Image (spheres, grey):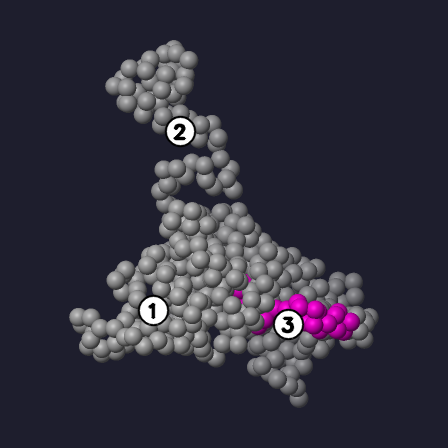
Amino acid sequence: MKNRLLFSWIGNTDIREAANRERLGPLVSILVASRFDVLYLIYDKPETEITSFIRHIEERVDITIIKNPVSLSDPTHFGDIYRAFDSMLNEAQKAYPNAELIIQITSGTPAMTAVSILLGKAKYSTKFVQSSIEQGVSEPDIPFDIFADFLPALAKKTDAKFSSLFSGQTPNSAAFADILTQSDIMETLKQKAAIIAQRDVPVLIYGETGTGKELFAKAIHNASRRADKPLLTLNCGAIPKDLIDTTLFGHTKGAFTGAHESRKGYFEQAERGTLFLDEFGELPLESQVRLLRVIQQGTFTLVGSTTEKLADVRIIAATNRNLIDDIAEGKFREDLFYRVAIGMITLPPLRERKGDLPLLAKKLLEKVNLDASDAPGYIHKKLSANAIKFISNYSWPGNVRELQATILRASLWQQGELLSEEDIRDALLETRPARDGILWRDISQGIDIDEIIKEVSVHYIERAIKENQGNKSKAAAMLGLKNYQTLNNWIEKYNVK
């Protein structure tokens, strides 16, 4: 006899009826009415409620229960619901390959019901069951067939997509699957990067620290024809100036004091592969000249040698500096910039990807939970609705890297299951703003512009008075004020000492 697996969200009605014990809730009614071997429960609720509810089930039926706690940005978020329910069904199908799958569609939000029906009809070929006070337990009549009703239209879209390949458009590559996003701008950049990956040209990736430059570089390499060859990463800002040449090009035995043997440089090690030059803008000018020669001529020479070697290496460079400004100031070579900036990608900061924040926060917390699963006494964490709201509204100047560190830090200090808004706030690291940072204050949480005006006024009034050894008439003139009395009015207004 086949195992019968029942899948169900836990809804508020289930919890309420279990607590009141006046009548059976939707899920328990179904369990009592029919035989099931395994119950897969999926929920986004506190474990205290779930423990009591499961006890309520076990008092009435003998069944194996598998819990699947999930963290949803909100209970109507179709994307989160789809990923969570799909993952549960997929794991169950692997564990019980010949089982009969039944989905309970009465509990949970309408979005949960809709996603359950879509997955059950289109991907897993499940049966459905429902329960109501009026009609009791029944199999619902869902009068449509995904394959017959919708696949013909989908096939037409697929044909159009194949046609687009021949018009120069490129589909998403699986190599970019690790770049999680729901924003249009990032999806466009992934498409752009997938196109660049197919062309063996140098790439320059711009972006603030923590925006995912290295992630894009790896994806471009993995989607390219060089994917089975080495991808080496070199932080240009971390190499001592006198070691850059030997690091990049290698050296022969005896080339300098301490060179007891020959050593390959990054160009030779990355042969036929990709060299990712992080912090590209930190290369000193003399090294830029030598790098330009390698890119132009396709050859390099080991330090201590006169024999040229061929260099078949793709360059992907990344920087958070404005190289155009550096060129104007003589800090970066214009010819090298234009040699590398063929495939240009500019990554937006996290504050411009607001819709991605709940998704990223959830995935980062899932990794934290996974990494800490063996830690003694660790309780898997999830984010409260207020925590997700705060994360979504905060500017994250350190981008994904700061978000990741903050979530990890919050999970260390919170011993319970739920990470609150206060936990996330407390886990933020306060940094001293730059002296000229007054023009770039975070306004996502609101600001007091009067306080900022006061701050600027006090700063310059104090400097002017000090500069003129306390002479207020001269200080007023320095500040562009009409007279001594006007300065006094400002001093009184802002209580300048």
Residue 10: x and y in percent read: 62, 64
User: Which amino acid does the dot numbered 1 rest on?
Assistant: Leu
Farthest bottom residue? 1
Judge whether residue 239 is colored magenta: no
Dot placed on the residue nearer the N-terminal end, 1 or 2: 1
Determine which residue is flagged by label 1: 248
Determine which residue is flagged by label 3: 7
Residue 28: x and y in percent read: 65, 68
Other-residue count near label 3 (Cα within 10 Å), few / some / many at <14 / 14–19 / ≥20:
many
Residue range (magenta): 154-180
Nearer to us in this view, 123 or 196: 196
Dot placed on the residue nearer the N-terminal end, 1 or 3: 3
* SS at badge 3: strand
Other-residue count near label 1 (Cα within 10 Å), few / some / many at <14 / 14–19 / ≥20:
many
Image marks 1 and 2: residues in contact by CB distance under 8 Å? no
Observer able to see residue 454: yes
Residue 41: x and y in percent read: 59, 69
- Kindly indicate the quadrant of the structure image that contains residue 471: top left
